[in-house]
Amino acid sequence: MNTFGFAENYHRWESIFLGGYSANTALIVRSVETVRIWGYDCGEMDMKTLGARPEEALPVEELASYIEANVVSGSSDGLRITQFSGGSSNLTYLIAVGEEEFVLRRPPFGNTVKTAHDMRREFDVLSKLSAIYLPAPKPLIFCDDMSVIGSEFYLMERRNGLIVRGAFPAQYSLSSDIERKAISQSFIQNLASFHSLDYAAAGLAELGHPEGYNRRQVEGWTKRYFAAKTHEWAPLESAIEWLNETIPAESGTSLIHNDYKFDNVMLAPDDLSRVTAVLDWEMVTIGDPLMDLGTTLGYWMSADAPNELLSMPFNPRVLMENVSRKQLVEMYEQAVGHLLPDMLFYYVFGTFKIAVIAQQIYVRYVKGFTNDKRFANFDRFVAALGQIAETALAKEKI
């Protein structure tokens, strides 16, 4: 899969940083968080359903007729549509017919770049992936008939569970170190299990080109950074130079999620150490699994990181303050049954990639492409991540 360009994918990056539904979220979230990004109150991340926003409403009669003819009877008598709130990328709706519930996914209204919101690719990938990987939601039917809702869409199964965005709900104390490590270990074990899948046997070999993956990633994200540059960030640019001079050969080949963190994972409410679903399959490809792990490590802040970074919705703060990145690597090693090479390159790359995503969002604000005040101070986020990368390189450890 080609690396994604900024112009086509800014909706994805905004979703990543604001904790919204960015892709493939056929699931209902039970936790509500208030998140502050660099001093700006982003409001409650309430991911329950609501009536569809007027500008994003679906044509009920046409959709009911399609579902009646192709999915389940009774649609014409009582189709109920609600929209999952949050998110700014592909749109997600809950479709209820009697006791049956489905999730509908469609591209944003006004989308003109098909490759940025490729419903057919999403459907095909999940169709094959869900057959071999239980946490991947199962898609049911794809429709490219524009007369139904005005765009391509697909229906998929609905799941329920808990997505943690920054903090666990109050009923989960997580006061036990054993409990915190069990949740973290399950999270990492699930990633290792995903990396071990036989993608060729599942018919997913055409997803990407693993040869030269690491170099393409480093060079691609470097180009994106300089295309979006607004400030001189010496620490970050030193890390960029180091990355380009230190690119390792691929350690192996596997499916790559590309955005694996806790706010893209669903947990069983009665057993937080059990992963019931993984979300956001929009960037899945084939490449080096350690690059995937490196991105996960990049999102995992140290206990001494700035408060604003620890308060971001990517991972539960209580876990980041009590489980180190080194421990996550050890958990991954235990899961795969062998030691890993030095993870410094992969961690610095992950940190750099996240900084570029923030920079791409920030430059949109600077240039007036968005007036969203939540992005006004994202330059500070970029600077902080650059300092983190520089510190890791100076200490030569993750």
Image: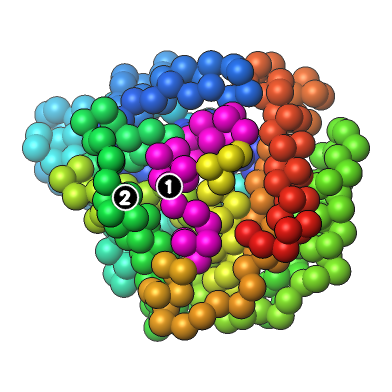
Which is nearer the eye, 271 or 249? 271
Q: Residues within 10 Å of mark 2 (few under 14, many from 20)?
A: few
The residue pinned by badge 2 equals 177
Q: Residue type at mark 1?
A: Asn
Q: Residue at x 81, y 47 (%)?
A: 236
For marks 2 and 1, the one nearer the N-term is 2
Identify which residue is drawn at 77% across, 20% down. Answer: 368
Q: Is residue 328 magenta?
A: yes
Which of the pair 277/115 is nearer the observer? 277
Q: Is residue 253 left or right of residue 85?
A: right
Is residue 251 positioned above or below 264 on the image?
below
Q: Which residue is mark 1?
A: 322
**Quarter of the image with the C terminus in it:** bottom right
Residue span colored magenta:
306-329
Name the amino acid type tagged 2.
Asp
Rendered location of residue 16, percent (x, y) = 55, 39
Reply above or below: 370 against 272.
above
Q: Is residue 340 left or right of residue 245?
A: left
